[in-house]
Image (cartoon, rainbow, N blue to C red):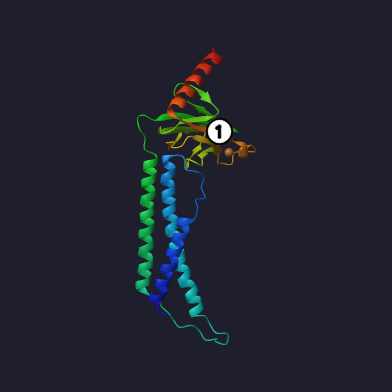
Amino acid sequence: MSAIKVGIVAIIVGAIGTVAILVTPSWFPVAAAVQAHRQDDLYLALMIMSSFIMAVVTVFLVYSVWRWRARPDDLRDGPPIHGNTTLEIIWTVVPTIIVIAFAVAGGVVLVKNEQTTSQELVVKVTGEQFAWTFQYPNGVVTHELVLEKGRPTEFAITSLLHDVIHSFYVPQFRVKADAVPGIMNYTYATPTRVGKYVLICTELCGPGHSLMRAPVQVMEPADFTQWLATQKSDQSKGGA
Ligand SMILES: [Cu+2]
């Protein structure tokens, strides 16, 4: 069988692999932020490209192992092969183009995901062994992260000064940032789906790490405004 025929079989198997990826249900938790959809699209493109290349390489590998295997009684040396310059140029240039294209696509997603706007809600997030605290622009402090659907939100993330490093991660938003003592890190999410989620710490931070979680709730704008006002008045009364 000629290399062209093997190439055709490889492309067909690669196409089957691509279809398999497309029909496989997503393994991820539900996407609940604008950023999550961008991450998922990029990840899907990476999976399709990876499965296609793996299928093509595997077909050539299996064919070569079968076609040029040594017979049990054949003890001769193999032919002295000095490589194939055309093939080497192809398998250097093509992967280089693919890697650069994905690096650019990843950069675009990162820049879009971290775009700031003037209407964004800024929530200060503080991690400590083993709890999360959230502070809103009006001074309200909570241990539940409540967000407004459709509102771009900036998380200003840090850790208590004499504490350790934690990591802020809401799987449904697909964004993550370290909480480091004395440093402010930022990440961004625009929630798209009303619901209850969980913020988890993803940096091993001590014996209570696995329990370092906080409830997250995304509300409709009117409900959020009311919630924030209620918290404000409750905390004002409590502090008076
Ligand atoms: Cu932790």
> Mark 1: which secondary structure?
strand
The N terminus sits in image quarter: bottom left
Above or below 115: residue 104: below
Residue type at the position of mark 1: Pro
- The residue located at (39%, 44%) in the rendering is 110
Would residue 138 be found to the left or right of residue 118 on screen? Answer: right
The answer to whether any part of residue 85 appears in the image is yes
Q: Nearer the viewer, residue 198 or 223?
A: 223
Q: Nearer the viewer, residue 57 or 208?
A: 57
| Residue 132 x, y percent position in the rendering | 55, 31
| Residue 113 x, y percent position in the rendering | 39, 41
**Displayed-image quarter of ligand 1:** top right
Would residue 87 be found to the left or right of residue 202 on screen? Answer: left
Q: Is mark 1 within 8 Å of ligand 1?
A: no
| Residue 57 x, y percent position in the rendering | 45, 68
Q: Nearer the viewer, residue 44 or 133?
A: 44
| Residue 6 x, y percent position in the rendering | 42, 74
The answer to whether any part of residue 165 appears in the image is no
- The residue located at (38%, 52%) in the rendering is 103
Graded by Cα atoms within 10 Å as few (under 14), some (14 to 19) or many (20 or more), the crowding at tag 1 reads: some
- The residue located at (44%, 60%) in the rendering is 19
- The residue located at (51%, 31%) in the rendering is 145
Most distant residue in the top direction: 240
The C terminus sits in image quarter: top right
Residue to which mark 1 is pinned: 215
Q: How many marks?
A: 1
Would residue 111 be found to the left or right of residue 168 on screen? Answer: left
